[in-house]
Image (tube, grey):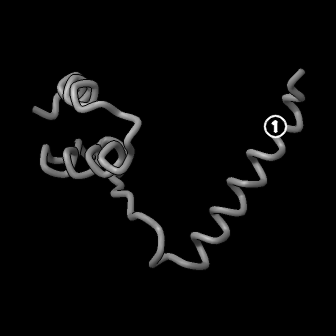
Amino acid sequence: MIDWDEHRRRMVAETSAYITWGLANPGKVRWIPTKRVGEGGFSPAMQRTFWFGVFGTTQLVAGDLLRRFLSWVHLD
């Protein structure tokens, strides 16, 4: 049986350690672009850059699935 409280504690500890490390090593983490709420969206080129960076580094996403997802989020 899974101890969900322990699982949650471990996830929080790992996330906290990663954030602490990332703040101490800003040149070693991937930059994520930001925008203020209500100031419009990102350009199509920036959207493609972000999503391909997210999905392009993993072997878990099949090409057809990635293309369908990108089409669904209007990145044609």
| Percent coordinates x, y for residue 28 in the rendering | 47, 74
Category of crowding for the residue at label 1, using alpha-carbon neighbours closer than 10 angstroms: few (below 14), some (14–19), many (at least 20): few
Residue plotted at (22% across, 23% down): 68
Q: Where 1 sits versus 27, above or below?
A: above
Q: Where does the C terminus fall, quadrant-wise?
A: top left
Q: Amino acid at mark 1?
A: His
Q: Is residue 54 left or right of residue 45?
A: right
Q: Where 39 sits versus 71, above or below?
A: below
| Percent coordinates x, y for residue 51 in the rendering | 29, 44
**View extreme (left): residue:** 76
Q: Is residue 69 left or right of residue 44?
A: right
Q: Is residue 31 left or right of residue 10?
A: left
Determine which residue is flagged by label 1. Answer: 7
Residue plotted at (90% across, 21% down): 1
Q: Where 21 sits versus 33, above or below?
A: below
- Locate residue 32: give its quadrant: bottom left
Residue plotted at (63% across, 63% down): 19
Between 42 and 27, the residue placed more toward the observer is: 27
What is the total number of numbered labels drawn onto the structure image? 1
| Percent coordinates x, y for residue 58 in the rendering | 39, 45
SS under mark 1:
helix
- Locate residue 21: give its quadrant: bottom right
Residue plotted at (22% across, 52% down): 49
Between 60 and 27, the residue placed more toward the observer is: 60
| Percent coordinates x, y for residue 12 in the rendering | 75, 48
- Locate residue 27: give its quadrant: bottom left
Q: Is residue 9 left or right of residue 67?
A: right
